Amino acid sequence: MIGERPEKYKAFIFLGAPGCGKGTQGAILGAIPRLYHFSMGDAFRSMDTRTPIGQEFISYSREGMLVPDELTIRYFKTQIDARADLHMFKPDIDILILDGIPRSVEQAKILEEHIEVLQLFHLSCPDREELITRIRKRALKEGRIDDASEEVIQRRIRTYEEETRELVRHYSDRRADINANQAPVKVTYDILEVIVNHPEWQTFAGDV
């Protein structure tokens, strides 16, 4: 039925180190019909802390505690359901592009109650110097001078690698490694080549 909410949303997951271009690629692909880009970082930045769920996040932050994975996934589900209710995201004909979630195997397991992960796109940047240059340029462009130091950048990259090593293994049966050191247009091309050959995409595209 048109507009009916499925039991699980279908999704492609984008995973990559800071500066690899996840946001850029998500924005480009999200402009293509039948794909809907959702950035967890953007959702966090726009959180209304006056709401009950926003107050829960504040309570953990105030105590200096990590936000539980269950709460993060609950906030994600609230956000994506709201977009479906507003018909911004049409789950009967759209596939999600998830950027910034899940961040761990624990989150992935909880997320599986709500999401059918069709493919993991691992945006790999083997050239560490290129990655550092990109992060530094972005930090300076956004006026975040402290984030432009090599020590901070190296720490962010190490944290990412430690957090996501097991997550990459978790999705090893549906992982596509994309070389993100290439020009953005070539990265987009390589991602689209995987998407258009995916059986679920062909089903969705055929229903248009």
Image (spheres, rainbow, N blue to C red):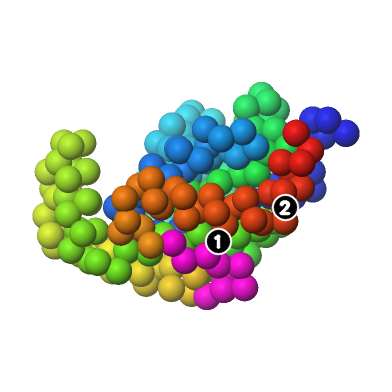
Q: Amino acid at mark 1?
A: Leu
Residue extent of the magenta highlight: 169-178
Asked if labels 1 and 2 touch by Cβ distance under 8 angstroms, the answer is: no
Q: Which is more toward the observer, 160 or 204?
A: 204
Q: Which is more toward the observer, 140 or 114?
A: 140
Residue 175 lies in magenta, yes or no? Answer: yes
User: Which secondary structure, mark 2?
Assistant: helix
Q: Position of residue 159 (x, y in %)?
A: 32, 66
Disc on res. 200: 2
User: Which secondary structure, mark 1?
Assistant: strand
| Residue at image point 30% right, 59% down | 181
Q: Position of residue 115 (x, y in %)?
A: 68, 53
Q: Amino acid at mark 2?
A: Glu
Q: Residue 106's quadrant in the figure? A: bottom right
Residue 92 at least partly seen? no
- Read off the residue under disc 1: 120
- Estimate the spatial distance between the alpha carbons at disc 2 and disc 1, rounded to whole Å: 14 Å
| Residue at image point 14% right, 41% down | 140
| Residue at image point 47% right, 66% down | 177
| Residue at image point 61% right, 67% down | 174
Q: Position of residue 199 (x, y in %)?
A: 72, 56
Assign the C terminus to one quadrant of the image.
top right
Q: Position of residue 121 (x, y in %)?
A: 51, 59
Q: Is residue 60 left or right of residue 197?
A: left
Residue 176 lies in magenta, yes or no? Answer: yes
Eyeballing the image, is 75 above or below 103?
above
Residue 205 at least partly seen? yes
